[in-house]
Amino acid sequence: MNTLSSIVALSIILIIVQESVRRAKRTISGFIFLAVPIILTPLWIFTNDFGVFAWAKLYTIILTACWLWSLRFTALYDQQWARVVLIRLFQLNILEAVAVDISAWRWASILNAASGTFLLMALPRSIEGVSRCRPHADLDYKDISRGWMTAFSLWNIAFLYLHFPVIVGHHIAVLGSTLIVGLYEPRRWLQCRIITLSLDLVLLASFSSILVPALDTSEWHTADGEIVVATISLIACTVCVTYQYYRSLFGETKS
């Protein structure tokens, strides 16, 4: 019960923090996403013993957050290729995890790699749905459906359960807080995902010795549980890609 309460509390905190950063002035958010990681990098190097994936994930997400900031607050938004790059960075985020699943080479991870591949297949590639909206310079992505973002969340939880069970509970809060915003306003999901995850990873890299033990869910991990979560992920992502394929063939039914 204590773990559940901690997850709920962290989810609420993340929603509030994300909303505050979203509404912050460009100079403040620019300092958070551009300057803070540069300042803290020496600390991260000397205090953390991350693996290759963790380092790659940290800086890929920071790069994505910086790119998002540039699209929101500079003339870079006017360049079509720049908006395409944001989607490619998000795809890279998924591909990194798929590569880790494949390299693990066990049944549950292979199932989850298939789920990630299906997510990539169902992710809208057009940037026509990407737009910058006032008053907060939100970068909306109108083409991501509630079904896709739900399948993504289940796949991501399964990935963490398979490879990083100690932080599953922590990232249930990260993914859950983002999903809550996305279910309410789907167009804001991608921006919310990038902002929330980048802030969270910066905090984890800076205070891992405090934050990780505080919400340690490694005891949740079992061999049978791996198959269960991977199967749930695969079912959700299969349904998602099937629905997207159906829509592409027959279009949306208009009332």
Image (cartoon, rainbow, N blue to C red):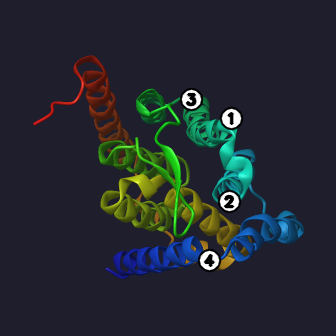
Question: Which residue is pictured at 73% across the width and 66% down the height?
Answer: 33
> Relative to 89, is 246 on the left or the right?
left
State which tag comes first along the sequence, 4 or 1: 4
Callout 1 amino acid = Trp
Residue 13 horizontal/vertical position (percent): 47, 80
- Give neighbour class at mark 3: few <14, some 14-19, many 20+ (Cα, 10 Å): some
Secondary structure, mark 1, is helix
Q: What is the spatial separation of the Cα atoms under label 3 and label 2, in whole angstroms?
A: 32 Å
Judging by the rendered image, the residue that carries numbered circle 2 is 69
Judging by the rendered image, the residue that carries numbered circle 1 is 81
> Relative to 53, is 40 on the left or the right?
right
State which tag comes first along the sequence, 1 or 2: 2
Q: What is the spatial separation of the Cα atoms under label 1 and label 2, in whole angstroms?
A: 16 Å
Q: Please state the total of marks drawn on the protein image.
A: 4
Callout 4 amino acid = Ala
- Give neighbour class at mark 2: few <14, some 14-19, many 20+ (Cα, 10 Å): many
Judging by the rendered image, the residue that carries numbered circle 4 is 24
